[in-house]
Image (cartoon, rainbow, N blue to C red):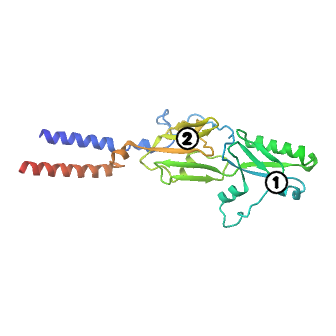
Amino acid sequence: MRSIKLLIIVLSSIFVSSCIPHKDTLYLQNKEAGTNDTIPYNLSEVQKPYRIQIDDILNVRIKVLDQDNVQIFNPISQSNTLEASSAERAYFDGFTVDVHGNIRIPTLGYFNVLGYTVKEIEALIEQRLLDEQFKETANIFVTVKLSGLRYTATGEINNPGTVTLFKERVNIFEAIANSGEIPVTGNRKDVMIIRQYPQGQKIHHLDLTDVKVMQSPYYYIQPNDIIYVKPLRQKSIGTGETAVSSLATIATIASLITSGILIFTRL
């Protein structure tokens, strides 16, 4: 009798610890308001201007009244065909920031852009064009954009790998959605963002189950970010993801233990 009680206690403990709580799978929970369905405060988005890093690819376009005078500044490579992907065209037609933080534009030479915003780079190029190539009457218009926002998602995620999105702003939920979403066994409470800085890499942590994540300065990802989703303890244990699968696992274990006890008692 004591053995049966002990078996029940053990199996109950396994069942409780193996199930993944429903609240751990939900995004953007209002953890303070409790029964309120609406957010009682406005969530302000926090995003600082991105500053250019090594290996970024910049798309630079220069326009003047007589566009024939700036063709050399706007190179179009032979890869610009229907067969070439957007990422390939961006790589061949763009200007890659080298290990010294420089880009090289035809006839204008080198620009050190490391740590600059795209708006600041536009002003630098425009000023050099006015100093060396054109007069103000040429109506120079310079646009500088990142050639796609590239990031890597890895860990407990359905489609790990490197993704390039052609948008200027991408939040963490968009990034995860474009990587196949986090499975039930992924830890949404501690998603790691590995971000590159001039001084080196830093790791930031996001709780995606808390609505206040939208106020985090790391809510919007940046180029070259690495998103790492840790697996939940239940996956490491190897138990079921849901109550039904856990019950099936426990039933199998109970059947094996019962069979073992019966065989042992008959010997």
Residue 178 appears in view: no
**Residue that label 2 marks:** 194
Q: Is residue 81 above or below residue 179?
A: below
Q: Please state which amino acid type lies under the numbered disc 2.
A: Ile
What residue is rendered at 73% in x and 64% in y? Answer: 78
In three-dimensional space, the C-alpha distance between marks 2 and 1, rounded to whole angstroms, equals 35 Å
Q: Nearer the viewer, residue 191 or 20?
A: 191
Indicate which label's residue lies in the foreground, 2 or 1.
1
Circle 2 sits in a helix, a strand or a loop, which is it? Answer: strand
**Residue that label 1 marks:** 73
State which quadrant residue 121 falls in. top right
Residue occupying the far front of the picture = 100
Residue occupying the far left of the picture = 267
| Residue 72 locus on image (x, y percent) | 83, 56
Q: Is residue 153 above or below residue 201?
A: below
| Residue 208 locus on image (x, y percent) | 51, 41
What residue is rendered at 33% in x and 48% in y? Answer: 238
The first of marks 2 and 1 along the sequence is: 1
Residue neighbourhood size for the residue with mark 1, other residues' Cα within 10 Å, grouped as few (<14), some (14–19), many (≥20)? some
Q: Nearer the viewer, residue 48 or 134?
A: 134
